[in-house]
Image (cartoon, grey):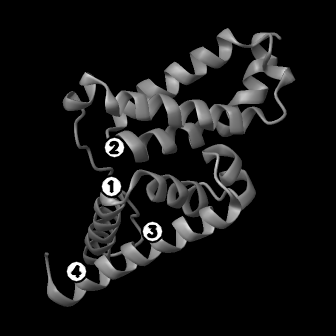
Amino acid sequence: MTQSEFLNVVMPFKDKLYRLSKRLLVSAEEAEDATQEILMKLWAKKKNIEGYKNVEAFAMTMTKNFCLDRLKSKQSSNLKLVHSNYEDGSRSLQSQVETRDSISWVERIMQELPEQQKMVLQLRDVEQYDYNEIADLLEMKPTAVRVALSRARKTVREKLVQKHNYGIG
C-alpha cells in the first residue's frame, strides 16, 4: 500500500479519531497526540489494512483502547483540562456566551458519566454511528447500546435542567 492509498483510506475518518480522543482525554493536545499515535500504528499495519472489513471501525476501536490505556496510566495525572472555544461571528456576544456555557456544561456532565455511557453518547450523537456499529466497536449487544444511550441522555438532560432551574449546582 502506497502512502497516497493509505491517506485515501484513513483521511476520511481522521477527524472522528480526534473527536473521540478529545472526548475521552479532554485535552486537545493529548487528543492530537493520541490521533497521531493511532495513525502511526495504522501506517505500521498498512500491509494488513486491506484485510480488515471496516478500517474505520478498527481505527475507532484502537483509539478507544489507546485513550483508555492513557487514562489508566500514570500519565493521566498530567492531563490538562482544556475547553474549546466555539466561535460564530454572526450571533450576538450574549448568544455566543450562552452557547459556550451550555456546551461547557454538557461536556462537564458527559465527563461524569460512566465510561460506557460516555462512549455510546459520543459515538451515537456526535459521530453519528448507528447502533450496530457502536455495538461492534464496544463489543456490546445493540439493545445494551440503546439502554446505555438512553441512560446517558437522561442523565445529561436531568443535570442540564437542574442547572438551569437552580443555577450552578
- Label 4, label 1: how many angstroms apart (C-alpha)? 16 Å
- Which amino acid, by three-letter code, is at mark 4? Lys
Front-most of residues 69 and 128: 69
Q: Callout 3: helix, strand or loop?
A: helix
Point 54% across, 67% down: residue: 149
Placement of 155 over or under 130, stated as above or below = below
Q: Which residue is under mark 1?
A: 111
- Label 4, label 2: how many angstroms apart (C-alpha)? 22 Å
Q: Which residue is under mark 2?
A: 26
- Which amino acid, by three-letter code, is at mark 2? Val
Which of the 4 image quarters holds residue 129?
bottom right
Placement of 53 over or under 23, stated as above or below = above
Question: Which percent across, then down, holds residue 125?
Answer: 56, 64
| 4 or 3: tag closer to the N-terminus | 3
Question: Which percent across, then down, holds residue 147?
Answer: 56, 70
Label 1–label 2 contact, CB within 8 A = yes
- Label 1, label 3: how many angstroms apart (C-alpha)? 11 Å
Which of the 4 image quarters holds residue 165?
bottom left
Give the number of the disc on residue 51: none
Point 33% across, 43% down: residue: 26
Q: Callout 4: helix, strand or loop?
A: helix
- Which amino acid, by three-letter code, is at mark 1? Gln
| 1 or 2: tag closer to the N-terminus | 2
Q: Nearer the viewer, mark 3 or mark 2?
A: 3
Label 1–label 3 contact, CB within 8 A = no
Question: Which percent across, then down, holds residue 91?
Answer: 38, 74
